[in-house]
Image: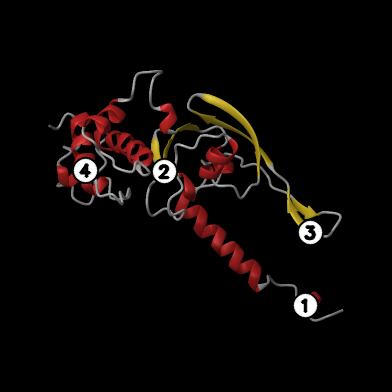
Amino acid sequence: MNEDSQKTGPTRRAVLESGAAAGFFLATGLPAAGQQMPTARDHDDDAGTRIVDPVELTLNVNLRNYSVGVDPRTTLLDALRNHLDLTGSKKGCDHGQCGACTVLVNGQRINSCLTLAAMHDGDAITTIEGLAKGAALHPMQAAFIAHDGFQCGYCTPGQICSAVGMLQEAAAGWPSHVSETLSSPSVSLTDAEIRERMSGNICRCSAYPNIVAAIRDVAGEV
């Protein structure tokens, strides 16, 4: 029996992995209380290679249920793009810094590259493809076109989804860093408020003035 097999406490690797996992789930949002996440199983194949079995999920995306089997480490962004062929949500930095992957989950905007698909089994997910009603564009989509709120367009799906979620947050009275009060029932969306609330969405073409104008138009603050 070697020295490693005599150790009874947690290994350094186990401690590091558990700490990283805890930090990830705290940063991206734990499942709701009582919600059971799908269980992942790993095992060795015949060649001795460690493999992870897929988990079966039902993702409700744009009012449609999709049954998918994915690696439990698959992000929501990769599940949307690679498994459901919904490529409107873009992969930019893949680190939650650019906002190109923003989608709405249960009405709230999130960075889909920072959360696991397995955490959203049964949640109501809305992507850029689900904002329009048939041939009728969502008012935010129409405003971005009217105000020329894009150039290359790569960040635009995330910008629009983020703007839709942001308007709901402002209507509910959620304050921002520049809000004058923390207890107002609603927020007046000044240019400063819009810029602060949209600061997580980067436009490398610098179409920010037109983006602000489009959001202000939809918010009725013109």
On the image, numbered disc 1 is attached to which residue? 4
The x, y position of residue 31, in whole percent, is 53, 43
> Which quadrant would the N terminus be assigned to in this image?
bottom right
Q: Which amino acid does label 3 sit on?
A: Thr
Name the N-terminal-most of marks 3 and 2: 3
Q: Is mark 4 on a helix, strand or loop?
A: helix
Q: What element carries label 2?
A: strand
In depth, the one of 149 and 37 nearer the eye is: 149
Of tags 4 and 3, the one toward the viewer is: 3
Left or right side of 16 for 193: left
| 99 relative to 148, above or below | below
On the image, numbered disc 3 is attached to which residue? 49
Residue at mark 2 to residue at mark 4: CA–CA distance:
17 Å
Name the N-terminal-most of marks 1 and 2: 1
Of tags 1 and 2, the one toward the viewer is: 2
- Do residues under tags 1 and 3 come within 8 Å of each other at their CB atoms? no
| Residue under the image location 48 percent in, 54 percent down | 26
Name the N-terminal-most of marks 4 and 3: 3
| 16 relative to 40, above or below | below
Of tags 3 and 2, the one toward the viewer is: 3
Left or right side of 173 for 119: right
Left or right side of 103 for 197: left
On the image, numbered disc 4 is attached to which residue? 194
The x, y position of residue 130, in whole percent, is 43, 27
Q: What residue type is labelled 4?
A: Ile
On the image, numbered disc 2 is attached to which residue? 110
Q: Which amino acid does label 1 sit on?
A: Asp
- Do residues under tags 2 and 4 come within 8 Å of each other at their CB atoms? no
Residue at mark 4 to residue at mark 3: CA–CA distance:
51 Å
| Residue under the image location 43 percent in, 54 percent down | 93
Which circle marks residue 79 in the picture? none
